[in-house]
Image (cartoon, coloured by chain):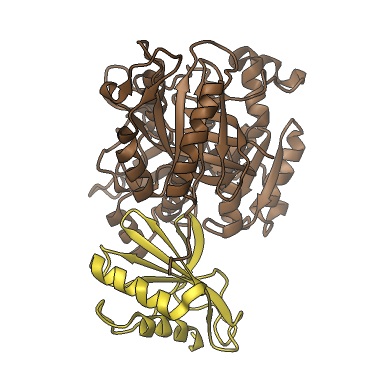
Amino acid sequence: MTAQNIDRIVAELIAAYRDGISVAAEGPRRLIRIAEVELYPTCQPPQTSLLLVLDVDQPKPQVFVKPGQLLANGRVPKNSSNVLVGGETWMQFSFNIPWAENQDIIRFVAAARQRFAQNE
Amino acid sequence: MSSVDLRIPLGLGEKLLDHVFQTGTHECVAFGLVSHAQLRRRPTLLLRKIVVLREEDYLPTRAHGATWRGAAMFPLMGDAVDDNLGILVIHAHDHEGPPRLSGDDLASAARLIPMFRNRVPSRPHGTVVVSRTHATGRIWLPDRTQPSDLGEVRWFGSAITDWTPATAISGENCSAFVRQSLVVGGQGQGWINRAKVAVVGLGGGGSHVVQQLTYLGIGEIVAIDSDTFEETNHHRVVGAGGKDLGRRKVDIMYRLVRQINLHGRLRRIHARIPNAVAVSAVRDCDIIVGCVDTLFTRSDLQELASRYLIPYVDVGVSIRPVETNNVTDRRVSISGNIVTFIPGGFCMWCSGFITDEKLKAEQQGPTRGYFEKNNDEAQVVSLNGVVSSQAVTEVLQLLTGFGGASVRTADTRVPGADVQRGYKKFDGVSGTLQEWGATRRKDCNHCRETLAAGDLIFRKPSA
């Protein structure tokens, strides 16, 4: 992602989530924490914090949620694992969305949230 | 109000002391750029960079101390803002024993600190004076109006050197350690008795380490492993017996420590790195010993060690058949490593022990089979014991400096070679343990981004 697109993405997230957002920088990375996003109602828990890592060396943002997040059917998401990000523990998970860096970040976040409505 | 500790990595300590103890017509001032984190239940400053003034930046003065052009601090303030770091103003009083901040020092702080806090409000700032043996300071933490006192200063070199406000640390008054104290001294035994060491991985390597750390008299061992004891572990896990099948390894180690019944205690964490409880426990330790099987876990431990300036000793053994066309040839190669990360020295990325390619290969294929997990890998208790014993000796050196304690980079080098000590290779066939050493790479992205990075500071964006 280009530095300009990262700045634009951060601005879009701030506009969408306002007070629910906080931002950190470390080296070339920008880390954006959304305090609470809604997941599918039967997910456990149905809300979580979400972390987006924007890196000029990566084509897409990396997305993480709080460790221990379960799917709508109460199971652990396939291909998920706990990882260290900036010294904190987060859960990484896989999901697919055709997305380019000049596109809307909110749609990208929505796809990440939607991943937890799936039952595997 | 609790005091604030300071950690100083190898290399920066030497640069700092060399500058502030220069003799001349004025005191010499160094500026330390710091991150911070809550470690061992105390706010802890982590020194990332030392900036010194040029001689022409000082203004002539007949008064005691030093004055300098305000504009000389512009680049420093720019660095602090760009990297979101706090600023320490550091100078020296050349004597032994606790120094005192003078009225001039406090007046200078009263002028500078509000300016620093205004520029970087989310990090601590302060003023520090060092003597040859102690340090004193006032630190303004974010969101606090009153300053805190500087507490312990921890220097990293060939050993850990702590400058504590207390005058003396004495060892456990226990005859069990009398003969060990002949080697490490009474004060050295004191450092051992108050140390907290994380042992990550409690299999063929980690169980040896736990046992020996207990015999040393380590104050607290934080034992981390999510596994249970299996029959295939029985030939190499020290302290385990046939009745332990299915028992958690942390519980077996807990029992082992209680059976030895010396000074220390063991905290059990039935989880694997990077579980949040395990990460939190590791952050609070003085030293990490990693006896793990994957590069991913090593990479996580290296990140924690670098970020919070914690020495990290990593061990592993690999036994493989020698590849020949002769099916009756049963020779094996036995190689082991003991890698000691001293904060500020080379890391596992600098030495090439961890690379992106290796991590990717591990993610897509079988684990390398150090000690555990890959059941096809051979394991022999005596070979694990050699590298584990050396790892414990590395811990002993770090805590007591029995082989020398110096913050000088030169004193950490392998004699006759331009490499730093701390990368030992074990050849189990010849029975040799050899110091290979390694060098901190100036272009190491891991060191540049992570060393002394402290906690991430998340901020609400300005409207």
Report x, y in % for residue B19: 36, 20
Closer-to-camera residue (B51/B296): B51
Tell me the quarter of the picture where residue B96 sits. top right
Above or below, B26 against B429 in this view is: above
Closer-to-camera residue (B170/B112): B112
Tell me the quarter of the picture where residue B438 sits. top left
In the picture, which chain is brown?
Answer: B
Closer-to-camera residue (A60/B291): A60
Query: In the figure, is residue B333 to the left or right of B157?
Result: left
Above or below, B454 against B356 in this view is: above
Report x, y in % for residue A8: 30, 73
Which color was chain A given? yellow
Report x, y in % for residue B171: 70, 21
Q: Quadrant of the N terminus of chain B?
A: top right
Tell me the quarter of the picture where residue B152 sits. top right
Residue at 40% over, 24% down: B29
Do we see residue B234 in this rendering?
no
Residue at 34% over, 57% down: B359
Residue at 56% over, 87% down: A72
Report x, y in % for residue B114: 49, 42
